[in-house]
Image (spheres, rainbow, N blue to C red):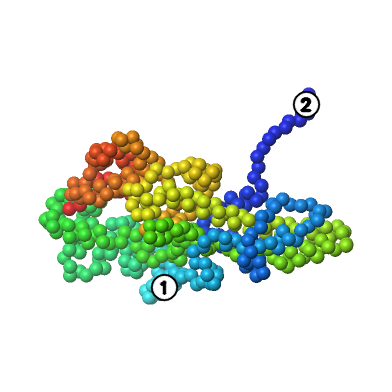
Amino acid sequence: MQKLGLNQVLQQKLSPQQIQFIKLLQIPTAELHSRIEEELEINPALDEGRDKEEANSEEDDYDDGVDDIDDDISIDDYLQDEDISGYKMQGDGNIKEDEREMPLPMTASLMDSLLSQLGFLGLDDRQKEIAKQLIGSIDNDGYIRRSTEAIVNDLAFSRNIMTENEEVEEILAKIQNFDPPGIASRNLKECLITQLSRRDDNNPDNKIAIKLLETGFEEFTKKHYDKLQKKLGIDEEKLRDVIHIITKLNPKPGDYISDFGRNQYIIPDFILKNSNNKLELSLNSRNAPELKISPAYADMLDAYSKSDKKDKQTRETISFVKQKLDAAKWFIDAIKQRQQTLLRTMNAIIEYQYEFFLEGDESKFKPMILKDIADKIGMDISTISRVANSKSIQTEFGIFPLKYFFSEGISTDSGEDVSSREVKHVLKEMVENEDKRKPLSDDKLEKMLKAKNYRIARRTVAKYREQLGIPVARLRKEL
């Protein structure tokens, strides 16, 4: 028999304002403008700019609570100062950020470039369709990795063109003469040979390089130089010259021409300047949009609230207008809170890693995790994570993502903790200064690090080396 019961459960739920703030906090500056444009489109009560009469007044606190429509409605809540540039903003001045012209890359796509070159081959309509199928099979690196048989089948099923492998190979050979050199190759070996074949034939080293790739590609990739010398019958100096020619070739010809989508400009969220050894932090001015409550909507609410007619339609209109006004105010407050959180977090990071920001020396990094910053400014770790995962800062030493400054700690023989970033920096210097004829193994690197008082295991050395993009010792060997 079923019984009815009453249980009291305490649950914590985020308010709509908190959810809106979280979403705004985690997006980078580059996306903030689009988010604001979206809000301006869906909420007519939100407007750009600031009130002229109150632009220089101080901000008043706003009560986030929503009054019932039967209560007295204070229009002053919506007409108070909306100036949110109370922080130092990079680029503050008479010119609005939206009015500044941003440089845009004007580059044709790789596909457009290849199709334009196709017109010079003098192919008939049928051959052009085959050529277009081949060009469409080229991946982002510039290779065709589908087999000729698969492309023949694609032509039969998608374009109703019956052809043979020989015809496709013939047209492919013509496309491989397009620019950039090496385009439409089936593999790295073919790509490099194609590039060498288009070079000056009078240089004997080019011919040796082609022979090396044709007969000793596997030995070349494994850096078995002694075997290559015997196979080619050349001395070490000549082999060094030939390998130098090969390593200067482009292994990814598709990157020669970039699509517009790849040409992304990094817009830093923070700008840090060093003025006489005094660090000055500022927010990118794009983080400080000038937003205000629409005076027209505020006047509309005032008019309806003073109306003697209080029928259902009027009450619904008042409710709708007030809802839009509240949403606009919440959005502006969320933008303000976003600025405050960004500045508090970044200032804490700078204080923690002050020596690095002052000198740009990676050896000055201190171990720092999200919890360190969260405890320092009294915020939740999840909030710090949202800031660190999508933001960057422009310094005199370059632009860095914020997560770059977070690293685990490693104990030294003296008992002190050092940043793993510092250990990676030391490891990188060791590899850069090694004898390339006899590269250092991971075991040797481990011993050298321990000699510098870094307690680190060989497997950790291998992990850091891989994170730095450094190949194993055998592949670092040079003549």
Give x and y (percent) for residue 455.
Answer: 31, 36
| Badge number at residue 116 | 1
Say which label, 2 or 1, has the lower sequence index. 2
Residue furthest top as drawn: 1
Which quadrant holds residue 459?
top left
Quarter the N terminus occupies: top right
Residue 148 vs residue 3, the one in the foreground? 3
Give x and y (percent) for residue 178.
Answer: 34, 69
Residue 257 vs residue 315, the one in the foreground? 315
Spatial separation of the CA atoms under disc 2 and disc 1: 76 Å
2 and 1 marks in contact (CB < 8 Å): no
Q: Can residue 289 be seen from the camera position used here? A: yes
| Count of numbered circles on the image | 2
The residue identified by callout 2 is 2
Callout 1, which amino acid? Ser
Residue 306 vs residue 297, the one in the foreground? 306
Give x and y (percent) for residue 439.
Answer: 21, 46
**What residue do we see at 44% from left, 51% from top?**
350
Callout 2, which amino acid? Gln
Which quadrant holds residue 414?
top left
**What residue do we see at 46% from left, 70% from top?**
103
Q: Give the answer, above or below, for where 369 lies relative to 116.
A: above
Tag 1: Cα neighbours inside 10 Å, few (<14), some, or many (≥20)?
few
Q: Give the answer, above or below, for where 258 lies relative to 25.
A: below
Which quadrant holds residue 48?
bottom right
Question: For the residue labelled by badge 1, is the local secondary structure a helix, a strand or a loop?
Answer: helix
Question: For the residue labelled by badge 2, is the local secondary structure a helix, a strand or a loop?
Answer: loop
